[in-house]
Image (spheres, grey):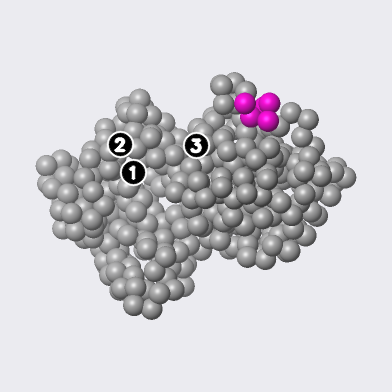
Amino acid sequence: MKVLVIVNRLDMGGIENMLLASIKSYKTKNIDIYIISNLGGGLDHEFVKKGITLIDLKGTNPFKQFFRLFYILKIEKFDIVHSQYSHNSGFLALASYLRKVPFFISVHNQKAVFKLSWENKFFLSTLRSLYLNIHKKLSLDFSSLIVGHSEVNLDYYSRKWRGNQKFFAVKNGIDFSNLNEQANSNNENNVAFKNFIYNASKVFIHIGSFKDQKNHSFLIDLFEKLEPKKNNYKLVLLGSGNLLGAIQDKVKNRGLEDFVFFAGMQKEIGFYLEKSDIFLFPSLYEGFGNVLIEAQYMKIPVCASQITPHYEAVYKGYHKYFFDPKDLNDAFIKTNKLIEDYDKCSLGTMIDKACYFSANFSVENMVNEIVLKYKARKREFNEG
């Protein structure tokens, strides 16, 4: 079976890394994955190394993407088209429908991130809502299946999605074997990190792109309130993004340069998790949060924001440490409580249970469920 996967750009993000990790499992199921994306991403060569054919999407304009996909499906046959564009997949769904190819949409966020800065601006918010509603209408009418990688993601389309054959919720997939291998890696940047955390009393870690939803500015405020200079705490931040410079400036202005390590975009996150003590994740919204699963698997206690997807991704024992991502005092109290319990060695059983809980989110399980849906929808499409 030939499947064409649509991705905006193959950079170092959670969606792209999950897709990369799943390639081997798809191949064992005799699924040939092709990817259409805007070429030039940081992971392009990694996919090519795995034998994946990349096709240039040639832009982000939805109307141009419509004609580009329409053309690609004319010159080459695919059994399934699977979009990772989430809430902006409507015109792509229409193009696939017109070419009589089943179309899947993966939804990776609980809210649409398109022009999010317009959300609270009267005129612009109206335009944004109109644009997204068009996509939603086209997606509902012309897609074969809408896949939520968190149950709450599907609420965007319908509060009554459960029991509706149009929707399907599946747990995200993690390549745990790769995490274990990464824990023992030793490149130049890793050596710098080991030197940075040498003799630290506690190492906090956060993994995520530097953008508004990840709430990095709040995270720095929280870390400062924890008094890292007095307590000899260290914080490591993995990721890149358009807000990186602003956060680096904030760290410098607060006099925290010796206590915060900017690791950049790293593929070998297992190494950093293995060397850390507590995982902090103050996101304002998420689709799921793969890194929460990875942290729990690596036996790192989790302190995260109390948003709905985190209740799906985090073992229930850690829920009492969840905090309001806009309330610094609440975050401080919950984080301090986790630190106290960690220092009293009272988290041992919970850490083990969380590791066991995370093992349910294997990439193999995710691929198995999606492939079953591919085959079923392809069969129904042919019969219909």
- In whole angstroms, how far apart are the C-alphas of marks 1 and 3? 15 Å
Does the image show residue 210? no
Residue to which mark 3 is pinned: 265
Give SS at disc 1: loop
Residue toward you, 308 or 271 = 271
Name the secondary structure under disc 3: loop
Res. 40 mark? 2
Mark 1: which amino acid?
Arg
Residue 201: x percent and y percent? 80, 37
- From the top left corner, tell me how far across and down residue 77 is, in percent: 17, 42
Where disc 2 sits, the SS reads loop
Compute the Cα span from label 1 to label 2. 8 Å
| Drawn side of residue 137 relative to residue 301, left or right | left
The x and y percentages for residue 217 are 59, 55
Front tag of 1 and 3: 3
Q: According to the image, label 1 marks what residue?
A: 9
